[in-house]
Image (cartoon, rainbow, N blue to C red):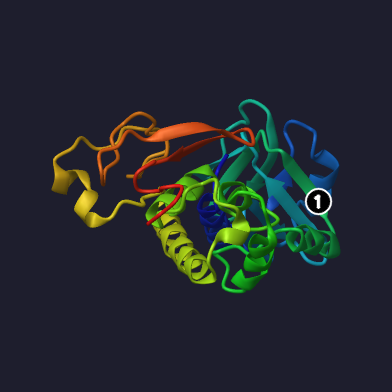
């Protein structure tokens, strides 16, 4: 599932290519046809992201809410548009570009009030300048649930997925099973600031890089990471491989239906 930086990149792209001008909206698949007909030819006012959710605002005609889920994708290209291929839920065509949306978990037309309600159910997003990290801390500091689960709970913290979860815990030496209420507030503030910096870098580059300069392949002589997710990381999807810091094999297990990765040495259960 795409993490928050991907949705913010899409929002910036769609803001640049489609906002401020009339947009042709259609649904070749047919599942969004009635809603597309109401928006066709209207002006997209703005595109924005909150966590893993994308919003196209057509005020006063409503807001398109998209959640890509596991399989959703946007494809983008310059005009002229090609004939639709596959199950295209929604097609947008602006002055210079077009985009097709396939396979989303959600693609729905909401009122502004309904769109606001979706955002209100989400936790603070490290990529939004209006984020209030204290809201997340209030939930975390009272919870017996593990910090690994809390970081993936979108009602606690919006936009963080499995990669950022694993990497920020490693970077701060926190064992994933630590109860939220056992996390210190100073540590939380440091983690939040780290997520802001890491995720902003992800928006700029389109990939997740979490490794410090001294651990990069060109410095250590190791082979660059080969993975479809891209980016240099410490533990994510590196199960059994040596930790880039201490050499301990990276551990992994399933937690709440998602794979969890950590270094038993760098993230001890009982730090000294």
Above or below, comparing residue 46 to residue 272 in the picture: below
Is residue 84 left or right of 76 when viewed as pictured? right
Q: Residue at x 46, y 47 (%)?
A: 269
x and y percent of residue 108 in the render?
79, 47
Task: Indicate the secondary structure of the residue bearing disc 1.
Answer: strand
Return the residue at label 1: 109
Q: Residue furthest top?
A: 86
Is residue 248 left or right of 200 when viewed as pictured? left
x and y percent of residue 9 in the render?
51, 55
Q: Nearer the viewer, residue 67 or 161?
A: 161
Tell me, yes or no, if residue 57 can be seen here.
yes
When asked about the image quadrant of residue 51, the answer is bottom right
When asked about the image quadrant of residue 246, the answer is top left
Q: Residue at x 47, y 61 (%)?
A: 195
Q: Nearer the viewer, residue 233 or 86?
A: 233
Indicate the quadrant containing the C terminus: top left, top right, bottom left or bottom right.
Answer: bottom left
Indicate the quadrant containing the N terminus: top left, top right, bottom left or bottom right.
Answer: top right
Judge the density around disc 1: few (<14), some (14-19), many (≥20) Cα neighbours within 10 Å: many
When asked about the image quadrant of residue 171, the answer is bottom left
Above or below, comparing residue 256 to residue 17 in the picture: above
x and y percent of residue 33 in the render?
81, 39
**Tally of marks:** 1
Tell me, yes or no, if residue 20 can be seen here.
no
Is residue 83 left or right of 106 when viewed as pictured? left
Q: Nearer the viewer, residue 26 or 154?
A: 154
x and y percent of residue 41 in the render?
74, 55
């Amino acid at each position: 599932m795409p993490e928050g930086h991907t949705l913010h990149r899409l929002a910036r792209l769609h803001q640049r290519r489609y906002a401020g001008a009339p947009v042709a909206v259609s649904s070749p698949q047919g599942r969004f046809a009635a809603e597309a007909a109401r928006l066709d030819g209207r002006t997209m006012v703005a595109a924005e992201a909150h966590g893993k959710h994308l919003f196209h605002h057509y005020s006063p005609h409503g807001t398109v809410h998209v959640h890509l889920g596991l399989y959703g994708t946007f494809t983008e290209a310059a005009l002229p548009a090609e004939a639709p291929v596959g199950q295209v839920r929604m097609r947008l065509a602006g002055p210079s570009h077009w985009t097709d949306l396939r396979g989303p978990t959600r693609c729905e037309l909401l009122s502004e009030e309904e769109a606001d309600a979706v955002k209100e159910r989400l936790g603070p997003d490290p990529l939004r300048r209006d984020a209030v990290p204290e809201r997340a801390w209030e939930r975390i500091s009272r919870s017996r649930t593990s910090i690994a689960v809390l970081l993936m709970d979108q009602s606690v913290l919006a936009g963080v997925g499995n990669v950022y979860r694993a990497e920020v815990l490693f970077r701060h030496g926190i064992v994933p099973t630590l109860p939220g209420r056992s996390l210190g507030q100073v540590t939380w503030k440091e983690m939040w600031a780290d997520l802001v910096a890491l995720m902003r870098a992800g928006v700029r580059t389109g990939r997740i890089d979490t490794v410090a300069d001294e651990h990069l392949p060109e410095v250590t002589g190791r082979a660059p990471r080969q993975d479809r997710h891209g980016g240099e990381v410490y533990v994510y999807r590196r199960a059994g491989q040596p930790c880039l810091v201490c050499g301990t094999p990276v551990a992994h297990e399933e937690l709440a239906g998602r794979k969890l990765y950590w270094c038993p040495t760098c993230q001890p259960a009982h730090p000294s």
